[in-house]
């Protein structure tokens, strides 16, 4: 059994809902309305691609599997583990690339990522961009493209389900 079942439902009103079912059967969920309904599914799927590819066990989904509630990330302030902050940083870099409308070269992605990491506020929360090989970047892009295609094929009222397992 996976550590977590990730379910993202595309509602008929344009909203979305993220539900995470832990291996013990407990659940955390969040409804994403308005603009958040358009933003968060791709953000959450990018987390899936990054954390799966890079083997993060204490990123967003790893912490959810450990019992964190989705709302805990809003209230934890500085208490979010370094690996989860690093995962969020990498996700942010890939989201910046997507917003630019074209793929960066591997060198450009790393350069933009380092700039983004250096601009994090407050400064006490800054962490460096992890070393991303060309292979890491290519695998993240490929998995993200695959789950984005799956999400794009989900009709309103239906749910995308992904299994997340931490590397042991």
Image (tube, grey):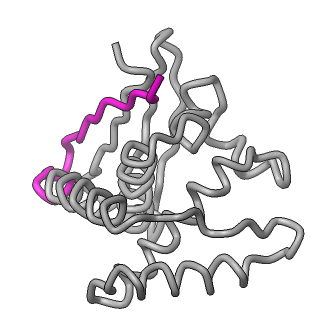
- Residue 114: x and y in percent read 60, 80
Q: Nearer the viewer, residue 148 or 142?
A: 142
The residue lying at 23 percent from left, 41 percent from top is 160
Residue 159 among those drawn in magenta = yes
The residue lying at 45 percent from left, 53 percent from top is 47
Left or right of 57? Residue 133 is: left
Q: Nearer the viewer, residue 122 or 159?
A: 122
- Residue 107: x and y in percent read 41, 84
Q: Which residues are magenta?
A: 151-168
* Residue 34 found in image quarter: bottom left
Left or right of 114? Residue 121 is: right
The residue lying at 46 percent from left, 29 percent from top is 166
Q: Hey, which residue is sitting farthest top in the picture?
A: 24
Left or right of 4? Residue 13 is: left
Q: Nearer the viewer, residue 161 or 107?
A: 107
* Image quadrant occupied by the N terminus: top left
């Amino acid at each position: 059994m996976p550590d977590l079942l990730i379910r993202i439902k595309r509602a008929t009103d344009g909203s979305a809902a993220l539900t995470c079912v832990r291996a013990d059967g407990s659940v955390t969920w969040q409804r994403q309305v308005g603009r958040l309904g358009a933003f968060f599914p791709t953000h959450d799927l990018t987390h899936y691609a990054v954390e799966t590819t890079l083997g993060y066990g204490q990123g967003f989904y790893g912490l959810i599997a450990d019992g964190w509630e989705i709302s805990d990330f809003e209230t934890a302030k500085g208490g979010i583990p370094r690996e989860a902050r690093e995962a969020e940083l990498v996700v942010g870099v890939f989201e910046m690339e997507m917003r630019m409308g074209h793929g960066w070269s591997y060198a450009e992605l790393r350069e933009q990522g380092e700039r983004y990491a250096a601009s994090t506020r407050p400064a006490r929360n800054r962490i460096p961009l992890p070393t991303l090989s060309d292979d890491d970047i290519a695998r993240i892009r490929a998995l993200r493209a695959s789950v984005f295609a799956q999400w794009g094929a989900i009709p309103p009222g239906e749910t995308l389900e992904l299994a997340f397992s931490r590397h042991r």
